[in-house]
Image (cartoon, rainbow, N blue to C red):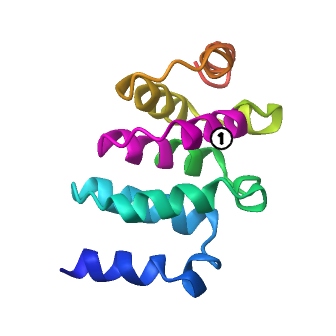
Amino acid sequence: RLLDALARRLMHPEILETVNSQNIANTVWAFANMGALNMDLMKAVAARTMCPKVLQSFTTQEVANTAWAFARLGVVHGRLMDTLAQRACQPDVLMAFSSQGLANTAWAYATLHITNMPLIDAIAERAICVDVL
């Protein structure tokens, strides 16, 4: 009941429009860790994530955690995953990924059976960097 109440509150338009990338990543990560699937919430945060201003503020950890959470809950949202992949492939973002972030992101796409070749190539390129090995 608490999670349902939190989801309803977060989906309120006046609240949702203020949600930032960290709020999104933390929320979906928490719901996924508890195995609490709320499809309305997932759709709402996916839509918010795809707003260009919000997307551009996503850090590597937020990209990885959001992708991981959707995969953990089995939520296939192709447009969101394509949007997160585009963010992850931006050179400044890609070079900031840790090995854990790369692994979590790769796992999420594999789990959801989403093949995004630019992302796969970018993860492979980053994974062979000295600071990641």
Residue under the image location 59 percent in, 87 percent down: 14
Q: Provide residue 79's location: percent of width, then percent of height.
A: 58, 40
Residue under the image location 23 percent in, 60 percent down: 36
Pick the quarter of the image with the C terminus. Answer: top right
Kindly give the residue lying farthest to the left in the view shown: 1
Which segment is the magenta one? Answer: 66-88
Q: Residues within 10 Å of mark 1 (few under 14, many from 20)?
A: some
Residue at mark 1: 83
Q: Provide residue 3's location: percent of width, then percent of height.
A: 26, 75
**At label 1, which amino acid type do we have?**
Thr
Residue under the image location 57 percent in, 44 percent down: 80
Which one is nearer the viewer's eye here, 83 or 72? Answer: 83
Task: Indicate whether residue 68 is drawn in magenta.
Answer: yes
Task: Indicate whether residue 72 is drawn in magenta.
Answer: yes
Q: Is residue 130 above or below residue 50?
A: above
Q: Is residue 52 above or below residue 95?
A: below
